[in-house]
Image (tube, grey):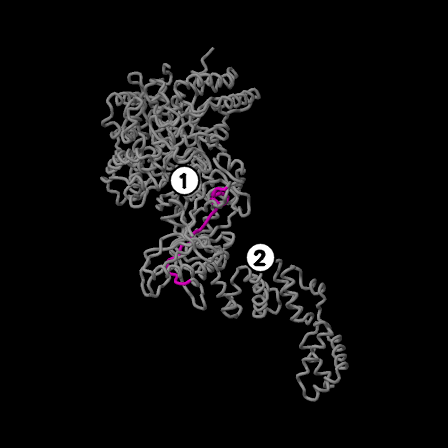
Amino acid sequence: MKIDIAHVAKLANLKLTPKEEKDFEKQLSAILDYFKDLQKLNTEKVEPISNITGLQNVSREDEPKPSLSQEDALKNAPKIHNGFFEVDAIFQENE
Amino acid sequence: MIDLTQLTIKEAGEQLKAKQVKATELTEAYLDRAQKFNKKLNAFITITEDIAKEQARKVDELIADNQQLSPLAGIPIGLKDNYLTNGIKTTAASKVLEDYIPVYDATAVTRLKDANVVFVGKTNHDAWAHGGSGENSDFGNTLNPYDVTRVPGGSSSGSAAALAADMCMAATGTDTGGSIRLPASFCNLVGLKPTYGRVSRYGIVAMASSLDSIGHLTKTVYDSALILNATAGHDEMDSTTSTEAVIDYTQDIERGVRGIKIGIPKEYFEGLDAKIKKVIMDAVKKLESLGAEIVDVSLPHTEYGVATYYIIQPSEVSSNLARYDGIRYGSGREAFGSEAKRRIILGTFTLSSGYYDAYYLKAMKVRRLIREDFTKTFEKVDCIIAPVSPTLPFKFGEKANDPLQMYLADIYTVNMNLAGVPSLAIPAGFIDGLPVGMQIIGPDFTEKQLYQIGFAHEQEAQLYKERPKI
Amino acid sequence: MKYEPVIGLEIHIELNTKSKMFCSCSAEYFGADPNTHTCPVCLGLPGALPVANKVAIASAQKLGIALHCENLLSSKFDRKNYFYPDLAKGYQISQYQEPFSLKGYIEFDVNGETVKIDVTRAHMEEDTGKLAHAEVENKKVSLIDFNRSGVPLVEIVSEPQIHSSDVAKGYAQKLQQIARYLGISDCDMEKGSMRIEPNVSLRPAGSNDLPQYKVELKNINSFRFVQKAIEYEITRQTEILEKGETPALETRGWDEIKNKTFSQRAKEMAHDYRYFPEPDLPPYLFTKEYVAELKANMPELPDEKRARFIRDYQLSTYDCALLTTDIDLAAFFEDTVKAYPKGEPKRIANWIIGELLRRLNESQTPLSSLNLVPASLAELLLLTDEGKITTASAKEIFEKMITSGKNAQELIKEFGVEAITTDKLEEVVEMVIKQNDKVVAEYKAGKEQVFGYLIGQIQRQTQGKADPKTAADLLVKKIKK
């Protein structure tokens, strides 16, 4: 089993070095081979378990509580502008 | 004068209460040691000297005022650096959060503050809690105080080393696949992985949400129970915390093991290193001689644990680490270390279109089978005893270049996280001067009974009195 | 070749809860300073965890019931993973496999015909932050405000069964009406609390296959623009297809100034949402009784109300449709009927449709923003019945009532439009006859068309306060004498 590392890295929003790509491909294919063990188990009639707590219907009342101050919200941001978080322009507008 | 850094929490608490010792004195003693040995062991990322002193002063005032305080008041502890602390740098041991100053406290931190503990500092660990050796920290390896050429176990490496080297009296940890129990085992400590949902995950950097258990390391079983008394309980900020009542975990801790049925699962002992097996079976015999009944049991899906775990965990990791985009805080995604990248890639792949059913869905099905193994076994026995690690503390670099070998070292610990059940790792003995631990596993919310069993063994073995020569 | 448009609508409705979907930040963020309505949860800070809003869930379920959906008893949240700067956590908590509601329909009228469009699903999710594009120090940047992040949304997805822009608009309007009836959302397109994203593609007329591509349209903030954007796309795609090419699978924004759609391609967007069950939120298990109770506590919906109005008030289907457009207007109608002793639903309907609804439409304001109570209209009608004011004056007074919120008596006094008494009118009529003896003589001689002139003179003398019918009767009587 081989992973299309470049495609997966794009999905994961990660930039990998060529060396990382090469290493990961080798390491992850060994790991995926190991996962093949699971195929030995017949789980056709087994329901997947996504939550092991047995809890259900956990919710809260619709009551607003104070938010963080704008200062605290922006405190750790590398780039801010007039109370906003700032990033490089994200649209390429055609026409 | 007594050496304050040799006390248990229970003993220190009694002395503080009796005004024989001041919290500031106790804190100074630990801060001195922390400063001194951190250079050697690299157990702390941050030592919070000023905060510790301030907290200790406050406790002394409260004691002078004859206030009723928690048994943890004035006790110097370490916090794993993935516990968010308001105003104190929290890095998750990753360059991504190198300068991150949280604006809120984790619920567990709030509860410990409410108990008036003293924060010595934030402990080192494998970045994002990814790893079993501590070697994945972006801030350098933490050394094992019992042998500085060997790993202290991970991911809660700094917490274990700091505690074993008496730089604090307890330290918090997180256990997603063994990250508390493994370092406890490698450093002759007591490590609790509570039932999933017993302690709030709110404010602790998420690794794999459905597996993360919030626990701690201590020298003794009693001390472990004291900490759980403070941290356990429902939290309205964490929808997965249980509303199950919190009990006093120290109560009846001396009950003993008479009549307790202990299961020995064959899957955990077949193929186990003979020396390690002997140490653990000797401990089991000790419990038998104290009145416990030993029963052979089987958990047939054990062998699928590592594969199941290494599908579910990286999948959740890939999603949980998506928020680190360098926009609202922290550095960009290029700052992730290679283990984090590896897990993100693996997890992104196992969730991706066309592969979800074969990996994630399959793993969730096997996870049910693994949980059923435990629930069925607990119909027959009260607890299970198993090894924590297939090996003794290993040398730095020994497994670092082979991720699969590293992952396979989790073989005895991941199943409890998959099942959600509590497990208490306690010292079992030594081999050639290196610690060996074992774990006592029980049904959901039976931490109290695990403490009783651990305590019975501890009274006999007294291993907590051993100290590393550093 | 002739083409048939294939249109599906994805509509997001922002619920009007007090707090956000998964945290307790106030959800009333509109117009607030940026990043003042955030907390660790909706900012996606490390360690933060979601806790679901009870009211938001119930609102989503009610909408499902109103759309005739199957409300799933077993439901859960999933994570939808993708990267975008306005998505704080790098995933959106949404519902994939087991949404609250599946498989319903919306029925509505378009150009006099009833149309039924199937609803694929109605699921809950959280809103994202908001991006603005700006230039800072000569550099193009995007600015992010997370106040909207985590506000509860319901996404309603239709089957691609829509084949015209009229039907698309009708579907969306009906959905808006239902959500407003339920009181779960303002559905204000301009404020963004209702967002319509049409998926438009074309296939050869007569074909039943789904086209191999689709174009998603965004940034549409009015029903009119929904139609215009769809029309524009149909023309654009027809031209491409006629050249023998296939339109690109893409997202296009609507430019309301240039009246055209434009390609809105974000940099390096890879799509594979990698849904998996949200591990931070345990699943939901509802009982049939719970769903039945939700349904029982729902207000009467537009279709039911319209049917009841037709039945109870004997009004035309058309009138009832207009009266039930808005739940407040319908209530206003019913309350006026109750407050007016003579009942006369038809007369009241005429007033509400002819006077009130017309003005509301002209000024684009909702009834709730007016200071108008049903009792005021009822009083006005009574005063007209008693001859205290003329119908013409009553209409003027009503307009003033709508704008000022004052009651009829006050306004009548204020503007002096009280109808003059019959005694006073008699005097005026006699005076007019006297002053226009020549004209009266012409009338008597059979020149009936001058009658209008005489009435006009009476109205002039009374500043229009004479009831036209009484004035005419008196004039005839007096001339005959």
Q: Position of residue C155 (x, y in %)?
A: 43, 52
Looking at the picture, which amino acid does disc 2 mark?
Answer: Ser
Say whether residue B36 is left or right of residue B57: left
Looking at the picture, which amino acid does disc 1 mark?
Answer: Asp
Whether residue C156 is in magenta: the answer is yes
Q: Is residue C353 visible?
A: yes
Q: Nearer the viewer, residue B188 or B355?
A: B355
Q: Position of residue B384 (x, y in %)?
A: 31, 29
Residue ID for mark 1: C280
Work out whether C354 lies above or below C151: below
Q: Nearer the viewer, residue C374 or B251?
A: C374
Residue range highlighted in magenta: C138-164
Q: Nearer the viewer, residue B248 or C113?
A: C113
Residue ID for mark 2: C368
Earlier-in-chain disc, 1 versus 2: 1
Say whether residue B165 is left or right of residue C418: left
Look at 49% across and 50% down and name the residue there: C15
10 Å neighbourhood of mark 1: few (<14), some, or many (≥20)? Answer: many
Work out whether B441 lies above or below C336: above
